[in-house]
Amino acid sequence: MLIKIPDGAVWVILGAQWGDEGKGKIVDLLSEDADIVVRYQGGANAGHTVSFDGKTYVLHLLPSGIFHPNVVCVIGNGVVLDPIALIEEIEMVKSAGVDVSGRLFISHRAHLIMPYHKLLDKLYEQGDDKIGTTGKGIGPSYVDKYARVGIRVVDLLDRDVFCKKLRKNIELKNEIIEKIYGETKFDVEKIIDEYIEFDKKIDEYVTDTAVYLNRAIKDGKKILLEGAQGALLDIDHGTYPYVTSSSPTAGGASTGSGIPPTKINGVIGVIKAYTTRVGEGPFPTELKDELGDHIREKGHEYGATTGRPRRCGWLDIVSLNYTIMINGIEKLALTKLDVLDELDEIKICVAYELKGKKLKNFPTDSETLSKVEPVYESFKGWKTKTSDLKSYSDLPSEAREYIEAIEKLTGVKVSIISVGADRNQTILR
Ligand code: GTP
């Protein structure tokens, strides 16, 4: 199934909810006609699932275009890189017959995840105020980036620079770690050896990816910028503090890749036919009943990275219209329509009420969002298996009504409809 991408297109593909929308499948699908796929933020906390020919792969760091031999994959400067996870993943795709040589590039400017980041992640997550992070060291690595003490891929090129930066970090971190554990946890020499070893393994992939990408734009290449997590988890625009530490939004695609905003000419929002959220934080349309359990089981809503059960609920147009606005989404890819196949009734949240009054905008704070009452519109379920259907007209009329209601409520066309995990289980419009 080929989705044609115009020459010179630079498209952002991002999650328009709280992550896990199925971006992996959509990016893999679009990659068939792309030249380059770029990951621009996050780290190994993402879990992008790609299924084809009866096999399923979960990618954490490599862009979802990796299974298309003609596609060059780039890990941009906005990503925080866990060396162990990256090497494991390169080995995983190699054993699946994928050759990454000459078609994987890693930014000099990407920050590294260090062993102390993982430990600090666990420490921050103790007590009642936890965010529900994946514990992979992502947040603490971004903290160091903004505190200007982070260690980047480029630092590995000069052993003296690397050792100096590492020693300074260990000194700072050991103070905190000693306070909590009563002992020093990290052996500097061991970390130096491990990371120098890592450098040897990734050396062939490391380059100035901003220069590479801007040259590719001049050459008219087709580029996809692949977001991880979702817009409602954005550090600036999401439901703070229950957010991720990076910018999955379209703006983040520019800063996380070095591609100027003026060169981005399309933004596709990926949404599920319902909503899920993993970890803590407000979720107005959450179903804490049997219906929520049914969606979780039917949709296998368990984290691809942590295995944690995801909270499930109805599609929320108020939050979707907000993410459409802040990202400039022009097309929607709707996934997991098949998960709703057995329901008698399906609801869409069309407004929020607070103390009997309709809210005009998506609330700016999590406290307010946790208090709103969703106002629903109800739709008749189609009670038909959709996972084998190939064209829009094949879909039951109730399913088409549901999709067209989403378009009417958002003013954005649903161009791609996914009715199963496989590449082929896709309907184009
Ligand atoms: P994050 O960046 O971590 O948010 O990941 P993601 O958006 O790529 O989503 P993820 O791969 O974690 O979750 C989507 C899951 O749904 C995967 O297991 C996919 O194989 C599966 N999936 C994708 N599209 C469909 C679909 O249309 N129907 C069904 N039943 N499953 C789907």
Image: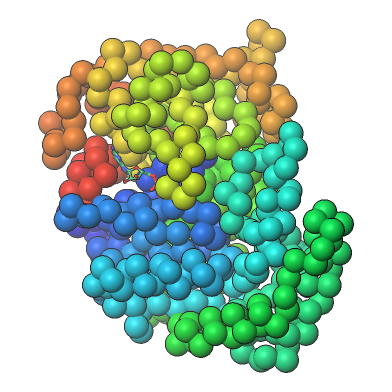
Q: Is residue 97 above or below residue 315?
A: below
x 69%, y 31%: residue: 366
The image quarter containing residue 389 is top left
x 57%, y 49%: residue: 134
The image quarter containing residue 114 is bottom right
Residue 320: x and y in percent read 50, 34
Q: How many marks?
A: 0
Residue 197: x and y in percent read 54, 85
Q: Which scheme is used to colour this image of the protein?
A: rainbow
291 vs 337, nearest the viewer:
291
Classify the position of ligand 1 by quadrant: top left, top right, bottom left or bottom right: top left
Residue 339: x and y in percent read 30, 29
Image quadrant where one finds the C terminus = top left
Q: Is residue 194 above or below residue 420?
A: below
264 vs 60, nearest the viewer:
60
x 57%, y 40%: residue: 232
